[in-house]
C-alpha cells in the first residue's frame, strides 16, 4: 500500500529524499549532482539515487513527439513510485514532471500517479527554502555573482525568490543584479540546434548583460541554460564563467 | 524550385539575428515601451484582476460567438448599416471591390487594420485601378517602402528617424532637413490631408464589435481613424469574427487594458464608437456603412476546444514586444501577417500546419508571452500543442521521427543509456582532442560551431554514485 501524498510529505521529517538527476547533468556536468548530494547531506538529509532513472522525456515532449515521451514518463513514475520526496537540480526537468506529466498522461491510468508525484517533486532551491526551511546552507563563495532566472523555474514553477534567498546567505558572495535577468538565454532544448542563429543571438545578448555586471560568475538553477551560456561566453573569451547554484551552495570554507 | 516558408524563415532569421544595427533599434524602442507598460500597469488598482476580467469577457464572447455575432448584425442593420459575412479573404476583397466599382470609388483612405493585411485588400483594390492611401503614419511609411508592416501595432518599429527622413525626401519629394519628428509628421500630413478629402471610401478595422449596441469600437492614436470613418461617403469596417464582445460596458475593461498592454497608455488618444451611416440631421458621417465579418479559418479554430482561446487575442502586441525571439529576428522574418508568439500560434491554423509549423518550433518556450498576455492566452503551451499536432500529422522530418524513436529505445533501457552515454563521451573526447569540435565530422556541430565545446567528463554521475558517493 502506498502512503497518501500528505503522509509522504511528512516523511521529509524523516529526512529522506530521492535524487532525480537530469540526463544531461548525469552525462555532461555530473559535478552539479555531486554538489546537490553534498548540500542535501549537509542540511541533514539522506539521499537515495534510484539507478534505473534515465530521462524525464522532455526532449521528445517539447519537440512534439508525445508518443515517444509518454513511455519515458511512465518509466519515470515507476522508478520514483516509492520515493517520498524527489529533489532535482533543474527547474526545467521538475517542470516536466510537475506541470507536463499530467497533460502528457491525460488519458492514461497513470495520470493520478503523475499528479501525486508532481506534487512531491521539487527543484533544489525550492526544496531547500520551502520544504526544508533552510536558506543558510553554510556555504562560502567569496566572489561576485549575477543570477539568471531560468524560464521554466521562473514561469512554470513560480520560483522567484528562492534561489536569491539562498545566494544572499552565502558567505563572502556579492550578488549583482543583471538587467533583463528574466529574459531567456536562448537555450530552449532542440531550439538551440534547430534555430542555431537565433539561439546564439539570444545568448549573445545575455552574455552582454552578464558582462555589463562585471561579475565573475553567472549562476542559475538549470545546467541546460548554463551549458549554452558557457558555450557563448567561451566562444567570446568572456571573463565571466557559469556555475550552477548547487555548485555555489556546495562550497565550504577551505 | 522556390524556397518554402520554412527555408525563407531560417535565412531571414539568420540574417536579422546577426544584424546588430537592427537589434539596437528594436531594443532601444522596446526599452522605452517596457518602462511605459510598467507605469501603465501600476495605474491599475489590480492589474491581474483586470486581466482576468478581460479573459472572462473574451471567453464568454468566443464561446457564444454565434449568438453575439447575430445580435451585432441585427443592431447594425437596425442602424441602417450593411453586414457582409466573408468566408475567406477572396470573398471579402470581392465584396469591397464590387462596392467600390458600383459607387465609382477611385480613391480609398485606410486606417490601420491587420485583417486587411491578412486578406491582401490593398493589392486587390489597386489591381482594380483604385488608389489606396494608408493613413496611419507607420503604415504610410511601410507602404512607401513597399513593405508589409513589421509589427501588428507598430508597423515601422524597425526604422529610425533618419531612415524615415530619407524615405520622405526620396518618395514624397519633400524638402526635409534633419530628422525632426515634427517636421516628418507635418510632411506626411500635407500628403494625407489631400487624400482624406479626395477619397470616396474609407476603410478601417475594428478593435471590438459591441453586440448589445451594434457599434464598432476603434482605438487609434493619430486621429486618422476618425477622418477615414467620417469624411468619405462610404465607410467599410473589415474585421475578424472573433472581435465581438457582449456589452458596451465591457469596453470599460478592454479599452484601458488594450492600451496599457499595447503602448502603456491609460487609453489610446482616440477611442471611437461607430454605429452606422449618418442619420438625417447629423452634421457628419458617411452615407453608407458596411461591416465585413471575416472568417478565413477562424471558425475552424473555434471548433478546436483545446486552442479556441487563441481567438481571445485583442492584438495588443504585448507578446511580440516581450518575446526574445521577436527581439532578435524582428517582425519581417516571420513572413506572416501576425508576427511574434501570437502569429506563431495562429498562422498554422490560418494557413496550414505543414507550411507554418516551423514557427511553432522557433521558440525557446520561455513563456514570457503568456506572462504578459492581457487576455491570458496560454501562448507558449499552444506552441507545444502545435508541435504535437505537427508530429501527429506526420508533417515533421522523417529523420527526426526516426531519431526520437531510437532515443526512446535508449531512454527506456538504463543500461543501454549508460553505455551510449559513455561511448558518445569517449568518441567525442577523441574527436575534440584532435581539434575537430564544430567541424563537419562532429555530430554535435550545430551546438559546437558557434559555442565552445560541451564538457565531456570521463565519468557520469551514476558511475560516481556507484564508486562511493552512494554511502550516506
Image (cartoon, coloured by chain):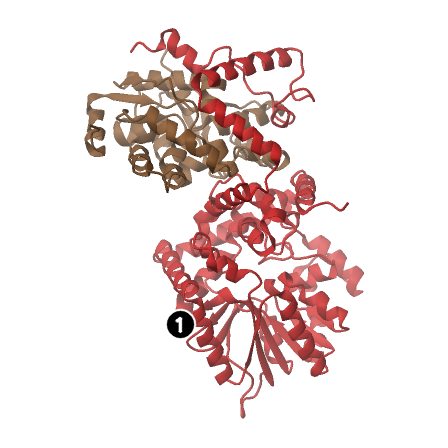
Residue underneath mark 1:
B247
Seen at 59% across and 64% down, the residue is B115
Farthest top residue?
B467
Location of residue B114 in the rendering, given as x and y in whole percent from the top left corner: 60, 62
Q: State the red chain.
A: B
| Above or below, B401 relative to B116 | above
Residue A249 seen in render: yes
Tell me the quarter of the picture where residue A99 sits: top left
Location of residue A247 in the rendering, given as x and y in whole percent from the top left corner: 41, 19
Of A22 and A254, the residue lying toward us: A22
Seen at 63% across and 44% down, the residue is B329
Location of residue A141 in the rendering, given as x and y in whole percent from the top left corner: 40, 19
Q: Is residue B419 left or right of residue B148?
A: left
| Above or below, B373 relative to B228 | above
Seen at 76% across and 69% down, the residue is B127
Q: State the brown chain.
A: A
Amino acid at each position: 500500500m502506498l502512503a497518501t501524498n500528505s503522509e509522504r510529505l511528512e516523511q521529509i521529517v524523516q529526512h529522506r529524499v530521492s535524487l532525480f538527476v537530469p540526463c544531461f547533468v548525469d552525462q555532461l556536468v555530473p559535478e552539479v549532482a555531486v554538489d546537490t548530494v553534498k548540500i542535501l547531506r549537509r542540511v541533514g538529509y539522506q539521499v537515495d539515487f534510484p539507478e534505473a532513472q534515465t530521462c524525464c522525456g522532455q526532449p521528445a515532449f517539447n519537440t512534439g513527439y508525445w508518443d515517444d515521451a509518454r513511455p519515458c514518463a511512465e518509466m519515470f513514475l515507476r522508478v520514483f513510485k516509492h520515493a517520498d520526496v524527489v529533489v532535482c537540480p533543474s527547474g526545467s526537468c521538475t517542470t516536466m514532471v510537475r506541470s507536463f506529466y499530467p497533460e502528457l498522461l491525460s488519458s492514461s491510468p497513470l495520470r493520478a500517479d503523475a499528479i501525486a508525484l508532481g506534487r512531491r517533486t521539487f527543484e533544489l532551491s525550492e526544496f531547500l527554502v520551502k520544504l526544508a526551511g533552510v536558506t543558510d546552507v553554510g556555504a562560502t563563495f567569496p566572489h561576485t555573482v549575477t543570477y539568471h532566472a531560468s524560464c521554466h523555474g521562473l514561469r512554470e514553477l513560480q520560483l522567484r525568490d528562492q534561489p536569491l534567498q539562498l545566494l544572499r546567505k552565502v558567505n563572502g558572495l556579492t550578488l549583482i543584479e543583471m538587467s533583463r535577468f528574466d529574459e531567456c538565454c536562448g537555450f530552449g532544448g532542440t531550439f538551440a540546434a534547430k534555430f542555431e542563429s537565433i539561439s546564439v543571438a539570444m545568448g549573445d545578448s545575455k552574455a552582454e548583460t552578464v558582462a555589463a555586471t562585471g561579475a565573475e560568475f553567472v549562476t542559475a538553477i538549470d545546467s541546460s541554460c548554463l551549458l549554452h551560456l558557457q558555450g557563448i561566453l567561451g566562444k567570446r573569451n568572456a571573463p565571466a564563467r557559469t556555475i550552477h547554484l548547487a555548485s555555489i551552495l556546495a562550497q565550504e570554507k577551505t | 524550385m522556390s524556397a518554402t516558408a520554412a527555408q525563407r524563415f531560417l535565412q531571414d532569421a539568420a540574417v536579422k539575428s546577426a544584424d546588430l544595427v537592427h537589434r539596437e533599434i528594436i531594443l532601444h524602442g522596446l526599452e522605452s515601451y517596457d518602462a511605459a507598460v510598467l507605469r501603465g500597469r501600476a495605474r491599475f488598482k489590480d492589474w491581474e484582476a483586470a486581466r482576468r476580467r478581460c479573459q472572462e469577457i473574451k471567453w464568454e464572447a468566443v464561446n457564444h460567438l454565434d449568438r453575439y455575432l447575430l445580435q451585432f448584425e441585427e443592431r447594425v442593420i437596425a442602424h441602417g448599416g450593411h453586414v457582409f459575412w466573408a468566408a475567406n479573404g477572396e470573398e471579402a476583397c470581392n465584396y469591397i471591390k464590387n462596392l467600390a466599382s458600383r459607387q465609382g470609388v477611385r480613391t480609398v483612405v485606410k486606417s490601420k487594420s491587420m485583417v486587411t493585411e491578412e486578406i491582401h485588400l490593398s493589392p486587390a483594390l489597386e489591381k482594380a485601378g483604385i488608389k489606396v492611401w494608408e493613413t496611419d503614419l507607420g503604415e504610410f511609411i511601410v507602404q512607401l517602402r513597399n513593405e508589409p508592416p513589421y509589427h501588428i501595432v507598430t508597423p515601422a518599429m524597425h526604422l529610425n528617424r533618419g531612415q524615415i527622413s530619407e524615405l520622405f525626401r526620396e518618395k514624397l519629394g519633400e524638402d526635409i532637413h534633419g530628422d525632426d519628428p515634427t517636421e516628418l509628421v507635418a510632411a506626411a500630413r500635407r500628403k494625407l490631408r489631400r487624400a482624406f478629402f479626395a477619397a470616396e471610401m474609407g476603410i478601417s478595422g475594428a478593435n471590438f464589435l459591441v453586440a448589445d449596441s451594434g457599434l464598432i469600437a476603434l482605438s487609434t492614436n493619430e486621429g486618422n481613424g476618425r477622418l477615414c470613418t467620417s469624411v468619405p461617403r462610404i465607410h467599410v469596417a473589415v474585421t475578424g469574427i472573433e472581435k465581438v464582445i457582449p456589452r458596451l460596458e465591457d469596453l470599460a475593461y478592454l479599452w484601458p487594458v488594450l492600451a496599457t498592454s499595447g503602448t502603456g497608455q491609460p487609453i489610446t488618444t482616440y477611442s471611437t464608437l461607430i454605429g452606422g451611416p449618418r442619420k438625417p440631421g447629423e452634421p457628419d458621417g458617411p452615407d453608407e456603412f458596411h461591416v465585413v465579418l471575416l472568417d478565413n479559418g477562424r471558425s475552424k479554430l473555434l471548433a478546436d476546444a483545446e486552442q479556441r482561446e487563441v481567438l481571445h487575442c485583442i492584438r495588443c502586441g504585448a507578446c511580440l514586444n516581450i518575446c526574445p525571439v521577436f527581439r532578435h529576428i524582428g517582425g519581417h522574418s516571420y513572413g506572416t501577417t501576425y508576427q511574434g508568439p501570437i502569429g506563431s500560434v495562429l498562422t498554422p491554423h490560418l494557413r496550414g500546419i505543414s507550411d507554418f509549423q516551423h514557427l511553432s518550433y522557433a521558440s525557446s518556450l520561455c513563456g514570457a508571452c503568456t506572462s504578459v498576455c492581457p487576455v491570458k492566452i496560454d501562448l507558449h503551451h499552444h506552441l507545444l500543442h502545435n508541435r504535437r499536432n505537427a508530429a501527429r500529422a506526420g508533417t515533421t522530418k522523417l529523420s527526426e521521427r526516426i531519431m526520437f524513436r531510437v532515443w526512446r529505445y535508449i531512454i527506456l533501457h538504463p543500461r543501454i543509456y549508460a553505455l551510449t552515454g559513455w561511448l558518445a563521451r569517449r568518441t567525442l573526447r577523441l574527436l575534440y582532442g584532435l581539434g575537430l569540435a564544430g567541424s563537419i565530422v562532429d555530430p554535435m556541430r550545430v551546438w559546437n560551431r558557434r559555442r565552445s565545446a560541451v564538457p565531456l567528463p570521463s565519468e557520469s554521475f551514476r558511475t560516481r554514485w556507484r564508486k562511493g558517493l552512494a554511502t550516506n
